[in-house]
Image (cartoon, helix red, strand yellow):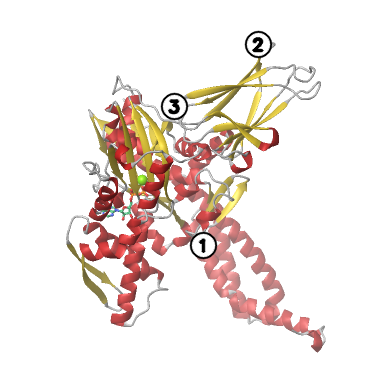
Amino acid sequence: MSKIVGIDLGTTNSLVAYMDGKEPKVIADREGRTLVPSVISVDEQGWIVGARAQRRLMTHPQSTVYSVKRLMGKGLADAQEERKYFPVSLTEKQPGIIQVELGPYRLTPPELSALILKEVKHRAEEFLETTVTQAVITVPAYFNDSQRQATKDAGRIAGLDVLRIVNEPTAACLAYGLQKKKQGVIAVYDLGGGTFDISILKVKEGIFEVLATNGNTHLGGDDLDQRLMELVLQEIRVEFGQDLQRDVEAVQQIRLGMEKAKRQLSTEEVTEVVIPLKQGVVYRRSLKRGELESRVRDLIDLTIGPCRQALEDAHLSLKDVDEVVLVGGATRMPLVHRLVQEFFQKAPHSELNPDEVVALGAAVQADILAGGIQNMLLLDVTPLSLGIETMGGVMSVLIPRNSTIPTNAKELFTTFVDGQRSVDVHVYQGERELVQDNRSLARFQLKDLDPLPAGLPRIEVHFTIDANGILHVSAKDLRSGRDQTIEVKPSYGLSDDEVARMIEESFKFAKSDMEARLLIEARNEAATILRHTERALKQGEPLIALDERDRIRDRITALKKATEGDDHRLIRERIEQLDKITVHLAECLMDSTLQSGLKDKKLSELP
Ligand code: ADP
Ligand code: MG
């Protein structure tokens, strides 16, 4: 029997969990590691995902990406803010769809996320010894429609049927069984690698409602590592007189070393930091938990403001909060635990592993969907209002935020002009009064209307938000009872055709095809260089010695021969050899063209 798994597709780390009898469990790899770093890299052999890709951030930064979740469901305009923070080369494939440059490839964020999903899918299949085709995937509570769509698309590209998209704080509550409460207010405090989210949820008989969310999209464990790394660089400067600031490799090595030390200090009072540097120099120092805490305390303090704001937005005070749940690897720090307890005046739940709790909750949800856990209704709510543009660019709300999903709404449309055959409708998501301040979700057109006097047609349009928080639109002509054709164009995100094509392409990127592709690329490059060299040789023959000419001819023949075979590495090797041996010829040609060019110019024209 195939299993439905729960996946936490995180910014920093991803995890997969399943239901083992009555208990959710995270699936580890053969070495016992549960986290898959959300990092993707590519080399001649194919895609590399996880810990191995993370190591390549140091050695192959051009062909390695991380934090792809930050780009999901965004157009280039939405991603400007993110570009300031991490070095990705972005282009726009078409309005609203970003492409990330990765070595020789350009992939959309859903395609990149799909590579991570494939990795965790594979891990689950190995462990469960069965195929895995269905999953529940979690997203932050504040993710809008296009970000949720993009996540679903990623699942489809990875060959997963995404049965449900669940809010991360909701999943965390599920892992703790908090849905069993009759009623209560829960604060979910999530401090991950690069993001901080605080969500205030209300649970009532199994229904979770997100009352408010707040946070900081650029605050997390990474900032602590950065702080410690700067400290070490400073100490190395003083102790060894070495400035390593620009030594990318050394900086990364120190960062990794300090991340490890930080983690150790969550369970130990003191740790020994040993970082080997170049030329046999070793940086060594002991670090106490107290010192770590005093050095990063101000960063953790930054999370309290958003907590206060979220409570205020939810119109609640501290005493209304019944439960506090800790989520995210960085909340393992005793300091974070203390500060959260101090602020909420309540001991937070920490029986479960905070970096596993979201995946565990996703597995619980998967089990509910599979019919394992019964007598339990679990519902989420839509995080943002859904409406349409009316006269003057005003947002008219059809489904208010926090409506329990699935939900639906109706609206009547008619025509303004006699004989009008179609009506344009523009759907928005957001909380602002004017549509220009909200997010355009979709445009659709009611088509093939009977030509009638203005105001006479009565077309009822149904908006349905499914259990994943995703919008569907249908329409009926009330006069004739006929279903109306509707063409919905998502303003952002990928169309069905595009997803289908990406699924196809993702197969193309599989290892064996990657080889074929590299061969084609190598042959094309060889053809170009052969053409150029033969032309250059014809022009330059009188300028070089006979034996040099013969050596070049030999290399040309060798490369031609290689292109007839199918070893792309050999072709590359011979391209390089030909390249090297023609340097002198190229210089001679350049000199001679320069001289003949100069002959025709007056002195005054020279730069
Ligand atoms: P995300 O939700 O962003 O994918 P995670 O929840 O996996 O991220 O959190 C990753 C962060 O947690 C990293 O900065 C990591 O250093 C930190 N972290 C993991 N374990 C510990 C620990 N034991 N003590 C302190 N920080 C930790
Ligand atoms: Mg997370």
| Closer to the eye: label 1 or 2 | 2
Residue type at numbered disc 3: Thr
Mark 1, other Cα within 10 Å: few <14 / some 14–19 / many ≥20? many
**Left or right for 556, reference 593:** left
- Locate the C terminus by quadrant: bottom right
Q: Are marks 3 and 1 in contact (CB under 8 Å)?
A: no
Residue 404: assigned label = 3
Q: Amino acid at mark 1?
A: Arg
Q: In the rendered image of this protein, does residue 195 appear above or below residue 465?
A: below
Q: Identify the disc placed on residue 481.
A: 2
Q: Which residue is mark 1?
A: 572
Residue 459 image-quadrant placement: top right
Instruction: Out of 73 and 327, give the one closest to the viewer.
Output: 327
How far is disc 3 from disc 1 in space, using C-alphas?
A: 59 Å
Residue plotted at (82% across, 86% down): 602
**Can residue 183 be seen at all in this image of the molecule?**
yes
The circle drawn on residue 408 is none
The front one of 333 and 41 is 333
Q: Secondary structure at mark 3?
A: loop
In the image, is residue 133 above or below residue 9? above
Contact check, label 1 and label 2, Cβ < 8 Å: no
Q: Quadrant of ligand 2?
A: top left
The image quadrant of residue 376 is: top left
- At a point 54% along the width and 37% down the height, the residue shown is 499
Q: Secondary structure at mark 2?
A: loop
**SS of the residue under disc 1:** helix
Residue 164, given in percent of the width and then of the height, sits at 41, 30
Q: Is residue 290 above or below residue 132?
A: below
